[in-house]
Structure formats: structure tokens, C-alpha cells
Image: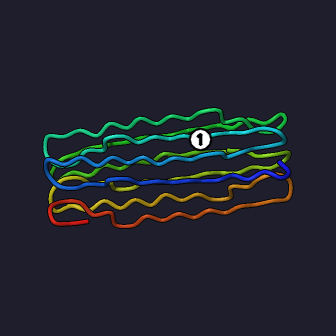
Amino acid sequence: GSDQTGDIILTFYNLSQGPDQTGDIIPTFYNLSQGPDQTGDIIPTFYNLSQGPDQTGDIILTFYNLSQGPDQTGDIIPTFYNLSQGPDQTGDIIPTFYNLSQGPDQTGDIIPTFYNLSQGPDQTGDIIPTFHNLSQGPDQTGDIILTFYNLSQGPDQT
């Protein structure tokens, strides 16, 4: 609502690659406030997305207190599909956040997309999260467009 802000603090840490290695991804979204006198914290956590042969990748996504203005709802539809790992494989992650409305008579759609997080030697993994139209309070908008491209994996790569 009025006099409110929505801070987004996205942190990717230790995206290690190649055999016998792990890559932890910890994105944090903090203080996405919505509507008059309300707060909505979003804390998604991705943990231990390990790479290479004979390894697995656990994803632990947590959403907390997504409150929204008067008489409003916020639907969250995260979808994780085909998180395959190891040589000659790809893992697509497509989480979708829809209709994170904010304040009276306003909407704010968040559509982060993670695509082709391939793992193992001689492979690459592109991460392209996109945040669009994070509107806040009456008559305000805040567009955030984050793009992460070509987070390659495998020996001797960064």
C-alpha cells in the first residue's frame, strides 16, 4: 500500500560444478509487502543442487506469509519438472508464480523461469529468472528483470 516498499534480495551462492562437487543455490526474497498495513514475505530456498555422475539434487521451496490487501488472494503455482542429473542429461526447472496481487485493485505477476539446468561433464546450464510487474501500493509499479545466463558446468569451468 501507501508508503511501502518491496525489497528483493536474490542470492546465488556456491554454484560449484563437475564430478564430485555440489552446488548450493540459496535465493532469498524478503519483504514483498502488499496492501495497507500488511506484509508478505517470500522465502524460497533451493538447497544442494548437486551435479555430476551418481548425484542427486534436492530442492526445498518454502513460501511464507503471502498476505495481500483487502479482499484479495494470491495464487502460487510452482512447478518443478524433470530435474535429471548426470552425464548426457538435462534438468529443466520451471517454477511459476501467478497473481501475486498487491494493494487495492492491483496485481503483480511474478514469473521466474529456470530452464535447462544441465549437469555433468561437458555441459552447460542456463538460468533465466524473470520478475515482471512487481507493483506496490496505489498507483505504483516496480518492474524487476533479473537475467542469469550460461551458468556452465563441468571441469575447469565457472
The amino acid type found where label 1 is placed reads: Ile
Q: Quadrant of the C terminus?
A: bottom left
Q: Looking at the image, which residue is at 28% across and 40% down?
A: 57
Tell me if residue 47 comes above or below residue 138 in the rendering.
above
| Label 1: element kind | loop
Where is residue 127? Give x, y as percent.
Answer: 40, 59
Q: Nearer the viewer, residue 103 or 5?
A: 5
Where is residue 54? Give x, y as percent.
Answer: 14, 40
Q: Looking at the image, which residue is at 72% across and 35% down?
A: 67
Mark 1: few, some, or many residues within 10 Å (few <14, many ≥20)? some
Where does label 1 land, which residue? Answer: 42
Relative to 64, 49 lies left or right: left
Tell me if residue 148 comes above or below residue 18 in the rendering.
below
Q: Looking at the image, which residue is at 41% across and 35% down?
A: 60
Q: Nearer the viewer, residue 104 or 23?
A: 23
Q: Nearer the viewer, residue 15 or 88?
A: 15
Where is residue 46? Give x, y as percent.
Answer: 41, 42
Q: Looking at the image, which residue is at 85% across and 47% down?
A: 105
Where is residue 16? Give x, y as percent.
Answer: 26, 54
Colouring scheme, one of rainbow, by chain, secondary structure, one colour: rainbow
How many tags in the picture?
Answer: 1
